[in-house]
């Protein structure tokens, strides 16, 4: 995967894949290329795009333009991981994304790793189930990332204070760890 950073905008882009596409016509086969790119600002914004052209650089440029137009904002916990566990799907592709402790790193494969790197996530555990197709994996990952809710959003929706939401999360995680220790 190719990684390029644009100095003026702070946008990082990663090339996920290039495919050669053949179209049969009367004179033989016409070849073109499709490029799949993921872009992000490493601070919580990410997007993806697919570009098609007769030459590879043109396809990458088109994919970059589409990806920058389709960027979404994802709230991050402490600027390093997601707030809660997520599930997403697209077609036959399903993904499971779990928040992780400090120092875990990015434990994800292929296109999901590229998304997390350009998004700015440093600690996450993710698993793809059902398909290895990069297009479906990216779309399933974006489906999951669109479901992320920060404590601020949840508190506003419920009419509570942020401290109440965060305290509930901490007490739930402590009881879950206590149950794991009891089961061993």
Image (cartoon, helix red, strand yellow):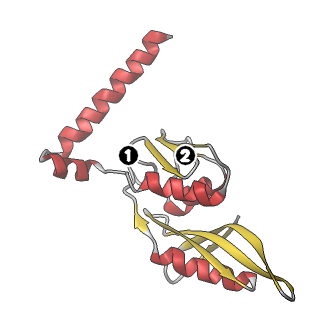
Position of the N terminus by quadrant: bottom right
Q: Which of 158 and 100 is in front in this view?
A: 158
Badge 1 density bin: few <14, some 14–19, many ≥20, Cα 10 Å? many
Give the number of callouts: 2
User: For residue 73, which numbered disc appears in the image?
Assistant: none
Image position of 162 (left or right of 14): left
Q: Which residue is drawn at 69% across and 75% down?
A: 34
Q: Nearer the viewer, residue 181 or 149?
A: 149
Q: Badge 1 is on which residue?
A: 83
Secondary element type, mark 2: strand
Residue 148: x and y in percent read: 37, 51
User: For residue 94, which numbered disc appears in the image?
Assistant: 2
Residue 100: x and y in percent read: 48, 40
Residue 26: x and y in percent read: 84, 87
**Occupied quadrant, residue 127:** top right
Of circles 2 and 1, the one toward us is: 2
Whether residue 171 is situated above or below residue 97 in the rendered picture: above
């Amino acid at each position: 995967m190719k990684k390029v950073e644009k100095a003026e905008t702070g946008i990082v882009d990663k090339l996920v894949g290039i495919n050669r596409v053949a179209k049969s016509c009367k004179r033989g086969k016409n070849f073109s290329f499709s490029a799949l790119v993921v872009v992000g600002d490493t601070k919580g914004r990410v997007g993806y795009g697919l570009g098609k052209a007769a030459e590879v650089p043109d396809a990458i440029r088109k994919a970059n333009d589409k990806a920058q137009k389709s960027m979404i904002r994802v709230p991050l916990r402490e600027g390093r991981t997601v707030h809660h566990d997520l599930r997403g799907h697209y077609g036959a592709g399903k993904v499971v994304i779990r928040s992780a402790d400090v120092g875990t790193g990015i434990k994800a494969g292929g296109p999901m790793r590229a998304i997390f790197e350009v998004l700015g996530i440093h600690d996450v555990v993710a698993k793809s189930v059902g398909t290895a197709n990069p297009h479906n994996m990216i779309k399933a990952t974006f489906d999951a990332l669109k479901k992320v809710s920060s404590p601020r959003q949840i508190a506003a929706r419920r009419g509570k204070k942020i401290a109440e939401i965060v305290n509930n999360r901490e007490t739930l995680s402590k009881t879950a760890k206590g149950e794991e220790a009891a089961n061993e």
